[in-house]
Image (cartoon, coloured by chain):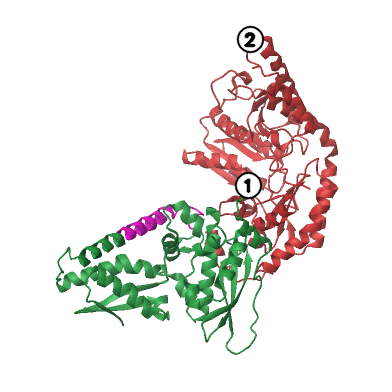
Amino acid sequence: MWDYSEKVLELFYNPLNQGSIDDPNQPDVAVVFGEVGSIACGDALRLHLKVQPSTDSILDARFQTFGCTSAIASSSALTEIIKGRTLDQALHITNRDIADFLGGLPEAKMHCSVMGQEALEAAIYKYRGIEVEHHEEDDGTLVCTCYGISEKKIRRAIAENDLSTVEQVTNYVKAGGGCGSCLAGIEDLILDAQQSVETVRAAAELAVEREQGIQPPISLTNLQKITMIQTVLDKEVRPVLVADGGDVSLHDVEGDRVLVKLQGACGSCPSSTETLKYAIEAKLQDLVLPSLVVEAI
Amino acid sequence: MLTYLDNNATTRTDPAVLEAMLPYLSELYGNPSSMHSFGGQVGAVIEEAREQVANLLGAEPTEIIFNSCGSEGNNTAIHAALAAQPEKRHIVTTAVEHPAILAVCKHLEKKGYGVTYLSVDERGELDLLELEAAMTGGTALVTTMVANNETGVIFPVEQIGAIAKAYGATFHVDAVQAVGKVPINLSQSSIDLLTLSGHKLHAPKGIGALYVRKGYRFRPFLLGGHQERGRRAGTHNVPAIVALGKAAELAQTHLAYVKREADLRDRLEHGILATISDTVVNGGGAPRLPNTTNIGFKYIEGEAILFMLNKHGICASSGSACTSGSLDPSHVLTAMGLPYTTLHGSIRFSLSRYTTEAEIGQVLAVMPDIVERLRAMSPFSNDQAGWLQERDLAIVT
């Protein structure tokens, strides 16, 4: 028998915010829902949001869930967490937040919290008119064909939950739970993520050293500069964007101007400017040259 | 109040069984293999138990080997059949066997054996023509259940055995769920090897037996001691053997009253189908054990139903993916080709001679509300609910 927390059982036996939301046809109120899962997979969640467009915030949230005890509790927890938040705040909620709200979930049930996070994202993207299908397809790479799990989804689960074993990945996003032919692929993604963490750590140390004047300022040839920018984009930036459903490619480098092309979900994402400034520029300034400026084309 | 309807998982030890075994846990602790009368007197009760088990099966006492559990019996039977005919490298079994058969077969496939897994239809029944087609002169073993643990569906073992014999194959049956629930008579049977387990028939856990037909070229699995005439090494688990003997004796008596269980089961089944829409009895069209029903509640998930039942003190089980900890739903229900709408929402109720009308009444009283509550939460409500089912194809591949 599963060792569920009291909070899980409480929200299962007496779920809060169960049901759907009808459109009240009032000014400054919009209703939208997002869906994930399927009856074939054994769990599915339809999350309904009532949004106030003027403040971009969530007025109310309800759920309809087909699934086990922890799937129902996770859905209910999610609705409690997001009520009153702005959509941007809600997008920062991770499956870990849902699990924490519940006082923890059994490892094998973590995928229930992931389902909550995904439904939330689906609902918000739908509200904002972002093509969810396109977002989900990522670059077309399905790692686990049994459960239809993309590389993006696995990378995100690994990064957000600090996963280090294939078994954990299976528990969180189901990938690898079927025929098992993708287990080696999942292992690669874990190693990749661990290396990426290592690179970031090394880069941070390098930055500290530079700040302290330990290393002399570097002068780079244009070719060196471009190669370094490409490397940083590939190793540091793209995995993060891919995990969020987008991607970036280097278009050109003109002096200190780095021209990049944003693809996928990021391209039409309202927070793309922020993504640009803080994610890409900061990385390149840190790791290549402090004078670089990033521009989207 | 505890309502225990999970007797295919395990059963309550009969008080008479407990009483019979207790002396061998306390003052009569001797080892039957010892050369003194204190131990030797225990040897006599083991032989008595052997006779009791043999009587239940219509077998001879020398045909019974005591062991530790059903899994050991199944492992031993497969090992023995292959060791007896080492030149034959093919096994025939079914897609709905217990993991103690399927896992061994998967393992043997890696070692170069060929295994045919016979399919079942939507009622859970085999196609004997498929069996016939699978048989070759190189088939060492045909191993099937007598009755399925999840659905209770009974296989026509004598017909299967006749086909196995025609091709010179060993015929083993996993009778763990059948013994004590349906009559078994091995005196006129094509069965070579039969597995049974004590805790499914009101003996404690940790005791089982393997029937080996007289004259069968048996090769032991556990080596190291002379116990069980060299066919199963290991110090006798005397209290449990005594318990199994007593349980077998009681089961034989009980077989005459098994209709009461079947009536209660039917009452439960009919009651649920009459009061709750969109429900279906899995395997309902096939011959079944008198104590088992497996009911699919569409659009809701089994583990959630179990937790709701648990709140009322009702014990049942489910083949849903969420119950097992694996991500796949029951291999038995999947093999029957059940639609996803019922696959994840199937609940098994299994009765015993202790099951009361009050227990059945309690399930019937709470079940409609449980299903209604969960369906109110579910986004699915009819068979046309096509949304998000597009992954069906991915699952099948």
Image quarter of residue A49: bottom right
**Chain of the residue on which disc 1 is drawn:** B
**Chain of the residue on which disc 2 is drawn:** B
**Does dot 2 land on a helix, a strand or a loop?**
loop
Per the picture, the main secondary structure of the magenta-coloured stretch is helix
Q: Residues within 10 Å of mark 2 (few under 14, many from 20)?
A: few
Residue B336: x and y, percent?
Answer: 65, 53
Identify the hue of chain B.
red
Image quarter of residue A203: bottom left
Amino acid at dot 1: Val
Residue A193 colored in magenta in the image = yes
| Quadrant the C terminus of chain A occupies | bottom left
Looking at the rendered structure, whether the residues under marks 1 and 2 are on a common chain is answered as yes
Closest to the observer, B385 or B206: B206
Residue A97: x and y, percent?
Answer: 51, 64
| Direction from residue A290 to residue A197 in the image, left or right | right
Residue B351: x and y, percent?
Answer: 77, 45
Q: Which residues are magenta?
A: A174-198
Amino acid at dot 2: Met
| Direction from residue A85 to residue B350 in the image, left or right | right
Q: Residues within 10 Å of mark 1 (few under 14, many from 20)?
A: many
The extreme top residue here reads B36
Residue A97 colored in magenta in the image = no
How many angstroms separate mark 1 from mark 2 (CA)? 47 Å
Please say if B348 is above or below B100: below
The residue that mark 1 highlights is: B96
Q: Which chain is green?
A: A
The extreme bottom residue here reads A27
The residue that mark 2 highlights is: B35
Residue B339 seen in the figure: no
| Direction from residue B171 to residue B85 in the image, left or right | left
Mark found first going from the N terminus, 1 or 2:
2
